[in-house]
């Protein structure tokens, strides 16, 4: 499918809510993400475990991102050590998926940019120093995040592999 999407005009990101119909047409390459959206996203929202945001293009859902609050231990990366803090507050990208017909059209990149903007916005009112995620064990997925400025932190005996982006440099009011 050849398609040029103008993300500044044709796309919106809207919060999933109980009145949102479960889009039976949404399907991504990874079936576990399709299932997450159809089965678990609503209950995660209801339980306060994560909020899913839908990427809409001409009234069609072409992707989603689920975000939640999280933290990372400063000892996981030397750049965050020595500041006297226990845990570093972060916005967690729990799930990010693109409709299979819209892969490699900029949907994932734009959802990441949206999540970073949200983290920067909220960091001005509450503690939030980073955007983080626990990636799949897939070189293509890991490369996707590395190309977008995320730093890889290997697993240790207590925590899974992670990627994080220090948003301090993106704040205009430092």
Image (cartoon, rainbow, N blue to C red):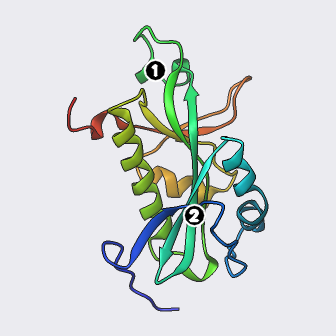
**Residues under labels 2 and 1: Cα distance?**
32 Å
* Looking at the image, residue 60 lies above or below residue 159: below
Residue at 31% x, 77% y is 9
Q: Nearer the viewer, residue 148 or 14?
A: 14
Residue at 41% x, 56% y is 114
Q: Among all residues in the image, which is located at the extreme top?
A: 84
Residue at 41% x, 74% y is 11
Q: Nearer the viewer, residue 47 or 94?
A: 47
Q: Among all residues in the image, which is located at the extreme bottom?
A: 2
Q: Please tell me whether mark 1 sits on a helix, a strand or a loop.
A: helix
- Crowd band around label 1 with a 10 angstrom C-alpha radius: few (<14), some (14–19), many (20+): few
* Looking at the image, residue 74 lies above or below residue 84: below
Disc 2 target residue: 64
In percent of width and height, residue 32 lies at 77, 62
**In the displayed structure image, the side of residue 129 where residue 94 appears, left or right:** right
Residue at 41% x, 42% y is 119
Disc 1 target residue: 78
Between label 2 and label 1, give the one nearer the viewer: 2
Q: Please tell me whether mark 2 sits on a helix, a strand or a loop.
A: strand
């Amino acid at each position: 499918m050849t398609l040029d999407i103008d993300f500044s005009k044709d796309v919106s990101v809207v919060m999933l809510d109980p009145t949102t119909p479960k889009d039976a047409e949404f399907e991504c390459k990874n079936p576990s993400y399709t299932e997450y959206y159809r089965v678990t996203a609503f209950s995660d929202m209801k339980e306060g475990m994560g909020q899913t945001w839908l990427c809409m293009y001409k009234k069609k859902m072409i992707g989603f991102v689920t975000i939640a609050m999280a933290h990372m231990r400063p000892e996981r990366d030397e750049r965050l050590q020595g500041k006297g803090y226990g845990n570093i507050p972060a916005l967690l990208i729990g799930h990010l998926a693109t409709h299979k017909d819209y892969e490699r059209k900029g949907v994932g990149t734009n959802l990441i940019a949206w999540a970073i903007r949200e983290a920067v916005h909220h960091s001005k009112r509450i503690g939030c120093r980073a955007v983080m995620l626990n990636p799949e064990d897939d070189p293509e997925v890991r490369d996707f995040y590395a190309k977008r400025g995320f730093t890889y932190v290997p697993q240790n005996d207590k925590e899974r592999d992670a990627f994080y982006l220090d948003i301090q440099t993106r704040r205009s009011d430092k």
